[in-house]
C-alpha cells in the first residue's frame, strides 16, 4: 500500500499541534517528516503511518514531561527557564 507521505505527514502534524501546543507547528512537522524518513525503506508500508504517529507522540510526550530546562528537539530549542 503506497500512501501520499506528504499529505499524511501534514495531516498528522496538524492533528498533533493542538495536543502539544508547547511545540511550534514547524517543529512538529519536521519531526513527523524525519520519522517518516526512518521508515521509507521498510518492506511493509501498511503500518508506517501508525508507527510514525506512535513514535512522534512518544517523543513529544517525553520532551513535554521533561523538567524545565532548555530541551532540544530536532535542533529547535523549546526554551524554558534553565535551572542554575
Image (cartoon, helix red, strand yellow):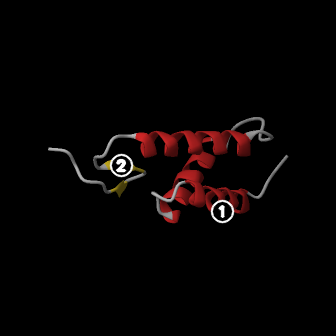
**Element type where label 1 sits in the image:** helix
Quick check: 39 left or right of 69? right
Which residue in the structure is indicated by mark 1?
Answer: 10
Which residue in the structure is indicated by mark 2?
Answer: 72
Seen from the viewer's position, the closer of residues 77 and 22 is: 22
Q: How crowded is mark 1: few (under 14 residues within 10 Å), some or many (20 or more)?
A: some
Q: How crowded is mark 2: few (under 14 residues within 10 Å), some or many (20 or more)?
A: few
> How many discs appear?
2
Seen from the viewer's position, the closer of residues 40 and 35 is: 35
Vertical position of residue 39 compared to residue 20: above or below: above
Where residue 4 appears, as percent x and y from the top left, is: 76, 58
Where residue 27 appears, as percent x and y from the top left, is: 48, 59
Where residue 2 appears, as percent x and y from the top left, is: 82, 50
**Element type where label 2 sits in the image:** strand
Q: Tags 2 and 1 in contact by the CB under 8 Å rule? A: no
Vertical position of residue 34 compared to residue 39: above or below: below
Q: Residue at x 55, y 50 (%)?
A: 34
Quick check: 35 left or right of 72? right
Q: Residue at x 77, y 41 (%)?
A: 45
Outermost residue on the top side: it is 43
Residue 22, disc: none
User: Quarter-wise, where is residue 55 in the image?
Assistant: top right
First of labels 2, 1 by sequence position:
1
Quick check: 65 left or right of 55? left
Quadrant where the C terminus lies? Answer: top left
Calculate the distance from the C-alpha at mark 2 to the C-alpha at mark 1. Answer: 22 Å
Where residue 68 appears, as percent x and y from the top left, is: 30, 46
Outermost residue on the left side: it is 84
Amino acid at each position: 500500500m503506497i500512501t501520499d507521505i506528504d499529505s499524511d505527514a501534514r495531516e498528522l502534524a496538524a492533528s498533533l499541534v493542538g495536543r502539544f501546543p508547547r511545540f511550534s507547528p514547524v517543529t512538529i512537522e519536521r519531526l513527523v517528516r524525519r520519522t517518516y524518513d526512518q521508515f521509507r525503506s521498510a518492506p511493509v508500508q501498511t503500518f508506517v503511518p501508525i508507527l510514525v504517529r506512535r513514535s512522534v507522540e512518544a517523543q513529544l510526550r517525553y520532551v513535554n514531561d521533561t523538567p524545565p530546562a532548555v530541551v532540544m528537539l530536532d535542533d529547535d530549542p523549546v526554551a524554558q527557564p534553565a535551572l542554575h
